[in-house]
Image (tube, rainbow, N blue to C red):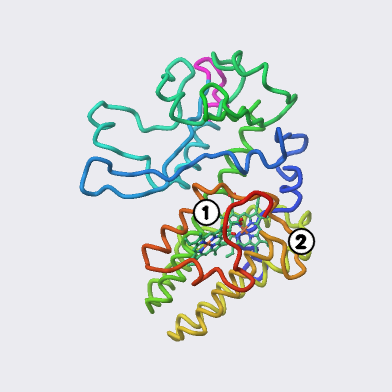
Amino acid sequence: MKNTIIFGVAFATLAAAGAWATPKLQILPTPVADRTFQFVKPGKSFLGTPLEVDSLTPHTLFVVGRNDSGELFVQASTMAFMAGQWAQEPGTSVEMVKTNRNLGPVVLDTDITEDQLAGYNLVLLGKDNRLYPQIAPRLSGSGSFVEVVKDALSPGRDLMFVSDKQAAFYLANKRLYFKSGAYKGFFSFVKTRALIEQENFAEALYSLDDPEGVRGCGKPVILAIGHKETLPPAMLKVAAERNKLVFKDLRQWLNLGAKNAAVATWQAAMETCYACHQGQDGVKRYRNFVPNQPEHSHHTKIASRFGLACNTCHKGKTAMVGYQPGR
Ligand code: HEC
Ligand code: HEC
C-alpha cells in the first residue's frame, strides 16, 4: 500500500456533489454545507483551574428522538466518537463538574435544555423527535439527505438535519472521520515544522509515525483509496508527490539531522497542500470551499506557541493568508 498512499486528500467528486458517499444522498443547501458546518470551536479546557488552556472543543450536540430506532442511536454515538477524535477536549470546567453537567455530546430530544439550544449547533437525526416539527417547514430535501439550516432554533446556532440512517452513516463514517484525520494531520504537520526549526528531530520523526500525528491523515488516505477509481489522475499524482516528500524525503533529512534540507522539503510539501486546496501549479482546485476560520486558525496558535511568524511558512507559492470567501 505504501506506494499508492494518498495523503490528506479527499475527492473532487465528493467536493463537487458529495457523490462518492452513497448514491442519491443529497447535501443541502449547497454541496459543501456539511464541510463548513461548525462542529468544533476554539474554547478553553480546565476552566477555573491553573491548568486552563486553549483547545478545540465540541460545538455540536447530536440529538436523537427518545423513541427513534436503535440504528440512529448507533450512528449518533459513532458521530460523537468521531467528533471526539477531532476535538481535543470536551471543554471541562470546574463549574460544569460542580453542577454535575454532562459533557457527553449525545442528547435525547426530551432532555435538551434551553442552555444547550443557545450554546451549541445541533445535528438532528431522524424525524421521530420533538424538534423535527419546528424545523420541518425550513427543510427542502427529500429521500436521503443532510440539510443545514442557519439560525435554526436559536439565533446564531445552526442545525444540521440528517434524514435517515444512510445519511447518518455518511456523516459519521465519512465526513466526521475525514475531518478528524485531516485536522489532526494538519496540526501535527504545523507542529513538525516548528520542531524542525528548533532542531528537535527526534520529536519531529515521532510525529511522522504517530497515528495521532502527521499520520492522522491516514484517515483521508483510507477514504481516498476506497474511491480511487473515481479520483482524477492529476489529483493522485500530487498526492503521491506529497507522500514521497513527507514520508520518504522528510524522514531521511530528519534522520540525518539536516535542518535546511528538512525545512526545504517541508515547504515543498506545503506547496502540495496549496496546489490542491487553492488550485496552483497546474493542479485543479480540489477543495471547493474555504475552511471555517475558528477551527482552521487553531494552527496559528500552535505556530505562535513555538514563536513562529506567519511568514515562516506563508511565502512564495504559499503566501496566501486570510479567510476571505472566494479564495
Ligand atoms: C491531492 C490533493 C490534496 C493535497 C495534496 C492536500 N489536500 Fe487537504 N484537502 C483536499 C481536499 C479535496 C479537501 C476537501 C475535502 C472535502 O470535500 O471535504 C481537503 C481538506 C483538507 C482539510 C479539511 C478542511 C476542512 O475544513 O474540512 C485539511 C485540514 C487539509 N485538507 C489539510 C491538508 C494539508 C495540511 C495538506 C498538505 C500537507 C493537504 N491537506 C494536502 C485535497 C488535498
Ligand atoms: C508552521 C507553519 C505555519 C505557520 C507559522 C502559519 N501557517 Fe497558516 N497554514 C499552514 C499550512 C501547512 C497551511 C495549509 C493547510 C490548509 O490549506 O488547510 C496553512 C493554511 C493557512 C490558511 C489557508 C486558508 C485557506 O483559505 O485555505 C490561512 C488563511 C492561514 N494559514 C493563516 C495563517 C496565519 C494568519 C498565520 C500567522 C498568524 C499562519 N497561517 C501561520 C502553515 C502555517
Residue at point 51% right, 70% down? 311
Q: Quick one: SS at disc 2?
A: loop
Q: Nearer the viewer, residue 80 or 50?
A: 50
Image quadrant of ligand 2? bottom right
Which of the two discs, 1 and 2, sits closer to the camera?
2
Q: Nearer the viewer, residue 322 or 15?
A: 322
Q: Is residue 232 left or right of residue 223?
A: right
* Residue placed under numbered mark 1 in the picture: 183
* Residue placed under numbered mark 2 in the picture: 284
In magenta segment, residue 170: no
Q: Quick one: SS at disc 1?
A: helix
- Residue 17: give its label: none
Magenta region: 65-74
Residue at point 53% right, 15% down? 67
> Does the numbered disc 1 mark a residue whose Cβ is under 8 Å from ligand 1?
yes
**Earlier residue among tags 1 and 2:** 1
Type of amino acid under label 2: Lys
Tell me: residue 220, above or below residue 121. below
